Image (cartoon, rainbow, N blue to C red):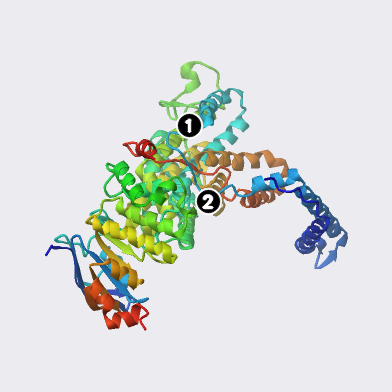
Amino acid sequence: MSAPVKPIDIKQSLIDAVVAGLLALIVFGPIVGIVLDGYGFNTQPGRVAALVGVVMVGRFLMSLFLQTPKGVAIAQSFESTGSGVHVLPPGYKTRLRFIIPLMIVIAVIFPVFADKYLLTVVILGLIYVLLGLGLNIVVGLAGLLDLGYVAFYAIGAYGLALGYQYLGLGFWSALPLAAIAAAFAGCILGFPVLRMHGDYLAIVTLGFGEIIRLVLNNWLSFTGGPNGVAVPSPTFFGLEFGRRAKDGGIPIHEYFGFEYNPDLKFIFIYAVLFLVVLAVLYIKHRLTRMPVGRAWEALREDEIACRSMGLNHVLVKLSAFTIGASTAGLAGVFFASYQGFVNPTSFTFFESALILAIVVLGGMGSTVGVVIAAFVLTVAPEMLRSFAEYRVLLFGILMVLMMIWRPRGLIRISRTGVQPRKGVLAKVEGAS
Amino acid sequence: MSKPILELKEIDVYYGPIQALKKVSMHIDEGETVSLIGSNGAGKSTLLMSIFGQPRAASGQIIYQGTDITQKSSHYIASNGIAQSPEGRRVFPDMSVEENLMMGTIPIGDKYASEDMQRMFELFPRLKERRNQRAMTMSGGEQQMLAIARALMSRPKLLLLDEPSLGLAPIIVKQIFSTLRELAKTGMTIFLVEQNANHALKLSDRAYVMVNGEIRLTGTGRELLTNEEVRNAYLGGH
């Protein structure tokens, strides 16, 4: 049975256009129409009229288009295609699985073609992938809204910087230690917030993030305060990447006898970072299939039900906080050695919001979505350098559109169904 | 007389300054179906939750199979043979029926998962039809069935049900109670907290009536059904 093609309702479109025009008038009127001039102001009705006109014509055309069969089809495709988690049959293999080797190949040959600028942008993108993956465990899987996630990032970065300054730790020893320190901090934050949910949890974590930043900013004698701390370059088996080695080390180009390449440090960071991202991706992939991953998701869905089923919610929550935080600690170490310098302005609330945006935009709990979103949100601002003033505006518009059309994020989580070890499905299938 | 599987001895429970349970004593024997009826706010759900230590009893003892579980953590209790279908069903909305059932196996591991899931599908054929559907898209009655089945997946020795009739159509309530009767016949020990006194009393071997945090009456289901006071207060007797 096919629905009869409705005639185009021009009256409805006109009403839509007028309503949109009124809204535009309210929004643009004060913003565009009134221009401050010293202590007085000028009104500029012409500009408002032009903008409102554009909005009305646009709304009218859109309304007409959405009434054509093609438009109806497009509108329907934007209607929520069933919210929530999409459960795949166990043993389902995605058609896109060959993408992963392809991505690895691209990643391996990428530094050959990239210049330094592009390389640094991609390093930043990968750092945010790490951060996104970590926060995804806390927010996306365990459902604990953490607005102070940047604190763990800061702990990782300062772990390398201060560890070098006071203990003489290098990149390689700081990498695991910073992850452990951040995990420990995650645990400490986890304890007081065990009983909190939603808004209250968000406020406490927000406070935690600010505390860390303020301590870093004000403890002048230890952290250097706003002046920041210098971070050593990473080394490769004791070989340095500088043109001339400091304190008796050997520069890598002299050791292997090739010409000095200033980009080599970044290529090295890129390579290590890429391997770490791959490892984290794999670990996360395994975790979501392990009982603890299921427990996180169950906790997100219903804490009371979880507890009535004998799950120890304390362990489940703490493990989510700890693992999420340690990932941020790793990202912090890479960030510090990539910048060569850290100071507290890199760890403001805006950073937390950006990481949260990555998770929300990517789709809560979805790994692929988070990876894509991390690149979009870090690479896009670089691409938009020429629109400097409008960057944040575009960012906002992007978020609003996402929330309208893809409230569950770019990529909906699709979870592989459970597979009991004895193969219940086969049996059930056989019985029915 | 069989020995009690769960025994509450003079339990006091407080919510801040308010005493919710006053010296409540009761026992549930193995293989029995016991129900607790009472009006809104009488403390029925509090009693059920306090078995799990949420809230904890301020004084008194809760003894499960000879061990004192008054001070044990909820997850310890839940993983030692007491399963609960919480009030308001509380199924995992974004998980499929099968996944919800798998969650129920947490206390015992998935050794018997396939076998038990099969059993649940026999007990609740409706769940079999819906087994790949997400729980939030099912009707209230189906969700209740799922909640009960999920609780049963841990092979409990004692099944606690908190208002399985909550917000369900009378015909569905009837279905659920007939399933519970079947379940009771298999020897399962069931402790039922209900407002729907009529159904609950017909199903139970014994029942307690709770008023204002105290056990007012106790007796067999049949006795209480014909008791004048109960009839007037809970059965709409005229």
* Direction left: furthest residue: B1
Residue that badge 2 annotates: A352
Q: Is residue A274 visible?
A: yes
Where is A324 relative to A195, above or below? above
Whichever of labels 1 and 2 marks the residue nearer the N terminus, that label is 1
Q: Which mark is residue A340?
A: none
Q: Residue at x 29, y 75 (%)?
A: B14
Q: Residues within 10 Å of mark 2 (few under 14, many from 20)?
A: many
Quarter of the C terminus of chain A within the rendering: top left
Counting from the top left corner in percent of width and height, residue B5 is at 18, 61
Residues A258 and A62: in front is: A62
Residue that badge 1 annotates: A93
Mark in front: 1 vs 2: 1
Q: Is residue A419 left or right of residue A274?
A: left
* Direction right: furthest residue: A46
Q: Quadrant of residue B177?
A: bottom left
Q: Residue at x 52, y 26 (%)?
A: A98
